[in-house]
Amino acid sequence: MSQFDLTGKVALITGTSRGLGQYMGRALARAGADLIITSRDKNNLALFQKEIKALGRNAFPVELDVRDHDSIQNAVTTAHDHFGHIDILVNNAGCNVRKPSLDITWDDWNLVLETNLRGSFFVAQAVAKTMIPQNYGRIINIGSVTSVFGYAGLGPYCASRGGTKQLTMSLADDWGKHGITVNCLAPGWFKTAQNKVLYENEGWVEYLCDRIPLNRPGQPNDLDGAIVFLASDASEYITGQTLLVDGGISTGATKATLDT
């Protein structure tokens, strides 16, 4: 189990004011890591900071807007100066615009791609510059089942998450010689603030569960094991990979096929 121990490690997690970013932060803290938690408004991090401290770990709040290059540079410098090292990066900050493709605007496209894809790249670049001298790092880009599947009404989002998968492989090849692994953690259908309106439709939830072999949407803690694994020495020979945590929906199964 020592391979999964993150004691002494520092993890920077983008987008930790709510949602899955906080759940992944809790999992890393319980495994022993101290955290750098980020939000565009640092005031939104106060309660989460207290929660992590109650677990016996440090949580250092930093303002970060992944759409602003100067903000990225300042946040990473501030975080590195505080702890002296950054060992783990979780590129979690993201957004979505859910519209039919014919209704997507120029600004819609830019918002999603700049946040999910461009932001992930430049945060990873800034953090990698601190990891290379220590010849060690774990970078985890948060993708989605849409990294490998396409869905109607999610054009920019699917493009950004498909790009995240490809970016992960490129960075893994680029930085492997420096002891840095880069992987993509791709959740399936999890209820979040971005998509909670979908889960208010019982018919849609039934339709969704029909296509998930485990017969339920993901619960936030379903990501705990995967995030700790990819952040730890247990995954030191795994890089450039996309790990789907999706209840099996990417198999393309339905109840009809499962019952035959």
Image (cartoon, rainbow, N blue to C red):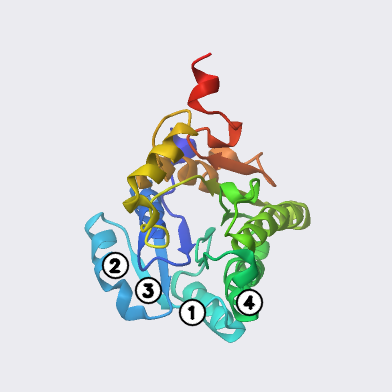
Q: Earlier in the sequence, mark 3 or mark 2?
A: 2
Provide residue 5's location: percent of width, then percent of height: 43, 42
- In 3D space, how far apart are the residues under numbered discs 4 and 3 (Cα atoms)? 27 Å
Q: Residue furthest bottom?
A: 70
Give the numbered dot on residue 78. 1
Q: Secondary structure at mark 2?
A: helix
Disc 3 marks which amino acid? Pro
Disc 1 marks which amino acid? Thr
Horizontal placement of 136 versus 1: left or right? Answer: right
- Report which residue position mark 3 lands on: 61
Horizontal placement of 95 versus 52: left or right? Answer: right
Question: Is 5 rendered above or below residue 97?
Answer: above
Residue 113, picture quadrant: bottom right
Specify few, some or many for label 1: CA neighbours under 10 Å numbering under 14, 14-19, or 20 or more: some
Disc 2 marks which amino acid? Gln
Q: Secondary structure at mark 1?
A: helix
Q: Secondary structure at mark 3?
A: strand
What's the residue at 32%, 72% (across, down)?
A: 45
- Label 4 or label 1, whichever lies nearer to me, is 4
- Label 2 or label 1, whichever lies nearer to me, is 2
- Label 3 or label 1, whichever lies nearer to me, is 3
Horizontal placement of 213 versus 118: left or right? Answer: left
Q: Work out whether residue 35 or residue 114 is closer to the camera in this orientation and state it.
A: 114
- In 3D space, how far apart are the residues under numbered discs 3 and 1 (Cα atoms)? 10 Å
Q: Earlier in the sequence, mark 4 or mark 1?
A: 1
- In 3D space, how far apart are the residues under numbered discs 2 and 4 (Cα atoms)? 31 Å
Provide residue 210's location: percent of width, then percent of height: 45, 32
- Report which residue position mark 4 lands on: 110
Q: Work out whether residue 118 or residue 218 is closer to the camera in this orientation and state it.
A: 218
Specify few, some or many for label 4: CA neighbours under 10 Å numbering under 14, 14-19, or 20 or more: some
Q: Secondary structure at mark 4?
A: helix
